[in-house]
Amino acid sequence: MTCPTCGKEIEPGWIYCRAPLLWSPKQGKATLFLGKEDVSLVKGGFPAAFLCRDCRKVVANY
């Protein structure tokens, strides 16, 4: 897979965390519960992700 920003090859791996990994439209939100606008990024295990070390970008499907 290539980086969507620079076009270089990106490394496969996984995202690990102890707290629920979620996306939220609100900055600085820290909670264990999902709000109605939040999206859980972990369902049934840790998500696979690709890392571009040059752009410092992570690409993942949820």
Image: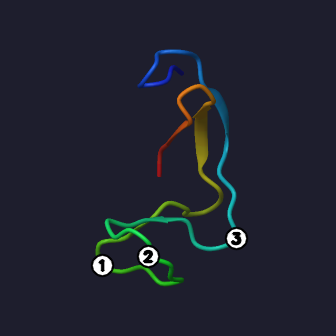
Horizontal and vertical percent position of residue 23: 42, 63
> Left or right: where does residue 50 sit relative to residue 59?
right
**Residue underneath mark 3:** 18
Q: Callout 2, which amino acid? A: Lys
Q: Which class describes the residues within 10 Å of circle 3: few (<14), some (14-19), or many (20+)?
A: few
Q: Is residue 22 left or right of residue 37?
A: right
Q: Earlier in the sequence, mark 1 or mark 2?
A: 2
Rendered image: mark on residue 29:
2
Q: Residue at x 69, y 57 (%)?
A: 16
Q: Secondary structure at mark 1?
A: loop
For residue 44, the mark is none
Q: What amino acid type should be assigned to the residue bearing mark 1?
A: Lys
Query: Whole-Å distance between the Cαs marked 3 and 1?
Result: 22 Å
The residue sitting at 58% across, 72% down in the picture is: 20
Quick one: SS at disc 2?
loop
Q: Amino acid at mark 3?
A: Arg
Q: Which element carries disc 3, helix, strand or loop?
A: loop
The alpha-carbon separation of the residues under discs 2 and 3 comes to 16 Å
User: Disc 1 marks which residue?
Assistant: 36
Label 1 to label 2: alpha-carbon separation: 13 Å
Q: Earlier in the sequence, mark 3 or mark 1?
A: 3
Which mark's residue is nearer the viewer, 1 or 2? 2
Count residues near mark 1 (Cα–Cα under 10 Å), then give few for <14, some for 14-19, many for 20+: few
Q: Nearer the viewer, residue 1 or 24?
A: 24
